[in-house]
Amino acid sequence: MMFGIRKRIQDYLVERRIRRTRLVTKYGQCNIEFGNVKCGNQFAFLVDFWTTFVEFRWRFVLFFFTVSFILSWFIFGLLWFWIARSNGDLTWQNPSKGHKYCVENVSDLITAFLFSMETQTSIGYGIRVITPHCSGAVTLIITQFLIGSIINCFMCGIILAKISIPKKRAKTITFSQTAVICPKKDFLCLMIRVANLRKTLMIGSQIYGKLLRTTIKPNGETIIMDQVNIEFMVDAGKDNLFFVCPLTLYHVIDKASPFFEMAVDTLHKQEFELVVFLDGTAETTSSACQVRTSFIPQEIMWGYSFMPIISRSKEGKYRVNFSNFSKVVPVATAHCSYCFHNMKGHHLHCINGIDNGEFEANDNLEQPNMTKM
């Protein structure tokens, strides 16, 4: 029992250390912070106030939403109270019987606040009403109406922008938890899976990767987070993916690939991070979005392949089994890229392939152009 508890603690500490050291989390957040930023550069956030407000967390947006309205009502309430006091409309000023009020039934600070709120929200109960006897009151009600309209437009725009923010669409696009390296069509490939959980398509989808690692140049210069392009593709190409079902994307490990020098026994000793990006446009909202994830060496499995997840039922419908989305099975694979490309007999392809346990035969013989699975 003590051994099991100790192992769980060690696994938790390792996972926590990995989470701290990776640049991009599995869910796409960037693990980076900025220090020693000059005050002049921080002022730029106030200049670009719209983007700053949109990027605020919801709790701060709702706080500013509430405060902006209440504060404006209170400030204008003070101004209405000042006008009423200047004109002698308040109760404690004992106005005469024929006194001409600036605002009817505004007799103290509370009624002034209520009149301010009713004016700005266009409630108009009819009890408190402005009169034409005070030009200052007419000017103030026009000013409050204009400022209130600006506040309404700004805060409603912020909320609508946050609701329709493209990265929320990215929550319904998921990557496999691990990547695999195995043979594919006479090539050694690194493969990942990606799925769109919505039935609406991502238009113009493109996927690419960046390998981040620390490199040392011949002159001794150390480059932290040196970026190397990693090309991913499907059988039909790498641009404009038909993203109607989960796709298995692969990167060919050839002599130009940074994975070519790695082997099954050295892969997990490497220090790098593979960041994968998927760019596309949501079909429903026409908003561009980007989905990110990352893989570290411990999340890349050499000699494994993904299990099949797409099948076809007897009714002719295609079905996706997401329970196998990240599951892998071992396949015969060369232990290094050099052996795969240069030594015959080290390819070790799995001749029989992987059995698709989800497949159901389609007995409908009336469709001559049936797609074979």
Image: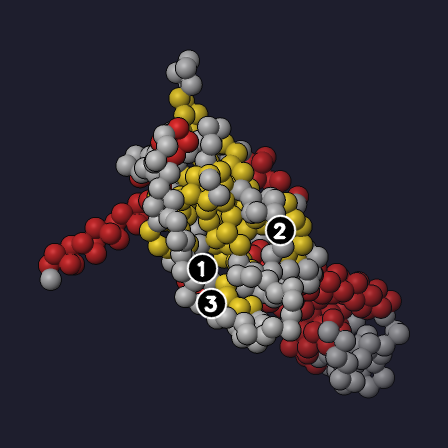
Spatial distance from mark 3 to mark 2, Cα to Cα? 24 Å
When the figure is inspected, residue 354 is found, relative to residue 90, above or below; the finding is above
Amino acid carrying label 3: it is Phe
Q: Which mark is residue 10?
A: none
Q: Which mark is residue 308?
A: 1
Q: Position of residue 159 (x, y in %)?
A: 64, 63
Looking at marks 1 and 2 on the same chain, the residue that comes earlier in the sequence is marked by 2
- Residue 5 seen in the figure: yes
**Callout 2: 10 Å neighbours few (<14), some, many (20+)?**
some
Looking at marks 3 and 2 on the same chain, the residue that comes earlier in the sequence is marked by 2
* Residue drawn where x is 50% and y is 52% of the image: 248
Q: Are marks 1 and 3 in contact (CB under 8 Å)?
A: yes
**Callout 3: 10 Å neighbours few (<14), some, many (20+)?**
some
Q: Position of residue 201 (x, y in %)?
A: 64, 60
Q: Which mark is residue 241?
A: 2
Q: Quadrant of residue 68?
A: bottom right
Spatial distance from mark 1 to mark 2, Cα to Cα? 19 Å
Q: Nearer the viewer, residue 270 or 286?
A: 270
When the figure is inspected, residue 167 is found, relative to residue 258, above or below; the finding is below
Q: Position of residue 373 (x, y in %)?
A: 52, 61
Q: Which residue is mark 3?
A: 359
**Farthest right residue in view:** 132
